[in-house]
Image (cartoon, helix red, strand yellow):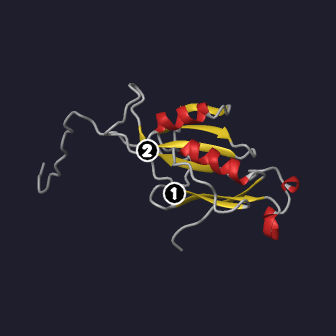
Amino acid sequence: MKRTWTIIGVSDVPGSFKWYQSLLGLPETPPAHDYFGQVMDTDGTVLLCVHKWGAHEHPSLINPDEARPGNGLLLFFRVDDFDLALKRARALGTRLEAKPNVNPRTRTLEFSIRDPDGYYVTISACSARSPAKGRLSRRSKPRQLNDPTPTSVRPPARRRSRRPQARITPTVGIRE
């Protein structure tokens, strides 16, 4: 497997398609169909597919009334320019569900909003920032996202001391 295509059920394909393009700073293009569209990055990578509810009788996309949109799903996008993404989200007039904050697991800035169909969408910076100045940090690298260990269970990271450590040398053959 090379990639997954996340497909969400929406009530208005052209409207949702335009909303995601605006949020992600992508060039505005129309969806391929009135019932389906692929939101693609500028390099052609499919980021998200939007599918009209009830089209084609896909079992999980038949009726939006059978489940709350987004139940069990988090749309999580990593972006190169967090500040511009936040500005675009605010321009969409969407209320922030979670204000910009530093995720303690990834140590990156993120915020969350709801899309027009009610899906929970999180936008995360690709790079960690220095908490003191809010700038990119050379020392701080984001944690691996595939680390399932909750932060509260993981042992604390060991810090290196800047002072030279005393060396212990074994003594061999000393008689008293």
Residue 164 in the image: x percent, y percent?
Answer: 19, 37
Which one is earlier in the sequence, the residue at label 1 or at label 2?
Answer: 2
Residue behind mark 2: 80
Q: Is residue 95 left or right of residue 46?
A: right
Which quarter of the image is occupied by the N terminus?
bottom right
Viewer-side residue, 147 vs 152:
147
The residue lying at 57 percent from left, 43 percent from top is 22
Q: Residue furthest bottom?
A: 1
Above/below status of 48 relative to 176: below
Viewer-side residue, 118 vs 56:
56
Residue 103 in the image: x percent, y percent?
Answer: 53, 39
User: Three-letter amino acid code at disc 2?
Assistant: Asp
Viewer-side residue, 29 vs 164:
29
Residue behind mark 1: 146
User: Three-letter amino acid code at disc 1?
Assistant: Asn
The residue lying at 58 percent from left, 66 percent from top is 4
Q: Is residue 57 left or right of residue 143?
A: right
Splitting the image into 4 quarters, where does residue 54 fall? bottom right
| Residue 48 appearing in the image | yes
* Number of other residues with Cα within 10 Å of mark 2, as a class: few under 14, some 14 to 19, many 20 or more: few
